Amino acid sequence: MLKYAYSYCVLAEELHFSRAAARLHLTQPALSHQIRKLEEEIGCTLLHRSPQKVVLTEAGVILARELSAALGQVNRAVEKAQDAARGDAGALAVGYCELPDAGRMTAIIRRYRAAYPGVEISLKKLPTNDQAVALVAGSIDVAFLHPPLLTSSLTLRPAGEEWIMAALPVFHPLASKKVVRLADLAGEWLIVCAEETGSFMYHDILAACGRAGFQPRLREERESWLAMLDQVACGLGVAFVPESLSGCSHIELAFRPIEDLDVRLQTAIATHGEPTRPSVSRFIDMAMSLLREAR
């Protein structure tokens, strides 16, 4: 039926076979053949023919009205499919950890939205290990996560790194120093990212404390960098956190570099293999371009 629907709608507008055939770039006999086939297919008479004019039957009026609306929806569906094929529409699920500025994620998404407003973006906050699982499962398309990772099925694109520094209660004696050393923290409770959440960073910190000559007392935080800062503000210890958190305007906290802690938080933009969907490929291309500009 769809094959003849447009021809019928044009004829219903013109109510004249010659004019309708001209609009459709058909011969008049070819148009008449299409209308007869349509009537046979649906089993009712749609119009009365005469040399002077075409008169629609009641069934013909209803069909013209409904087909016109349906064809409008079909055209919109085709346009959306074409937009999606070009990467101009569709959906994009982005996973991220707790640091939205890591890897310049917020700037990348703002630029992407300005370029492709038809793409619906959703954000899912997940720990790095959970993001890796979500990428493989297909529940997210892109991830801003923190390598290294144990899985090898992901494509990782470096997106930056930042030093790990100490977050201290503002009343702590070490807060008066511009820089602290690991040995200064011997005997303190150290609040760190839990081993199950960031095993590489956890063991790097442990090893650094060992080289500084002490076995640290650890409080492991599994969920949130900001929860670590809350513990510090309450006087429960000194937290090892990414440098970007030092911009927090928490009046109870002081942030200091750790001179002999060579641990950095890396950020990568990850996909499960190389992307094939245009919306994902364009996002990656735009992200890499912005990161190059920022260097």
Image (cartoon, helix red, strand yellow):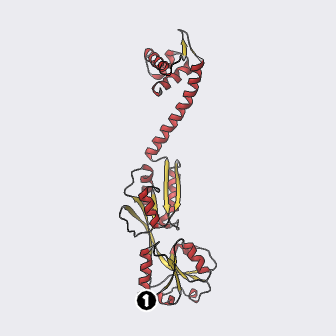
Quarter-wise, where is residue 46 in the image?
Answer: top right
Q: Residue at x 54, y 33 (%)?
A: 72
Where is 211 relative to 147, above or below? below
Q: Position of residue 278 (x, y in %)?
A: 42, 49
**Picture quarter with the C terminus:** bottom left
Quarter-wise, where is residue 215 in the image?
Answer: bottom left
The single residue placed furthest to the right in the displayed view is 251
Q: Residue at x 52, y 20 (%)?
A: 11
Residue ID for mark 1:
212
Q: Secondary structure at mark 1?
A: loop
Camera-side residue of 211 and 222: 222
Quarter-wise, where is residue 14 in the image?
Answer: top right
Q: Position of residue 85 (x, y in %)?
A: 43, 44
> How many residues crowd around disc 1 within 10 Å: few (fewer than 14), some, or many (20 or more)?
some
Where is 100 relative to 37, above or below? below
Q: Residue at x 51, y 56 (%)?
A: 111
Q: Amino acid at mark 1?
A: Ala
Camera-side residue of 91 and 202: 202
For the question of whether residue 17 can be seen, the reply is yes
Q: Position of residue 36 (x, y in %)?
A: 47, 17
The single residue placed furthest to the left in the displayed view is 152
For the question of whether residue 293 can be seen, the reply is no
Camera-side residue of 32 and 17: 32
The single residue placed furthest to the front in the displayed view is 43
Number of marks in the image?
A: 1
Q: Position of residue 195 (x, y in %)?
A: 46, 75
| Residue 177 as seen in the image, left or right of residue 29 | right
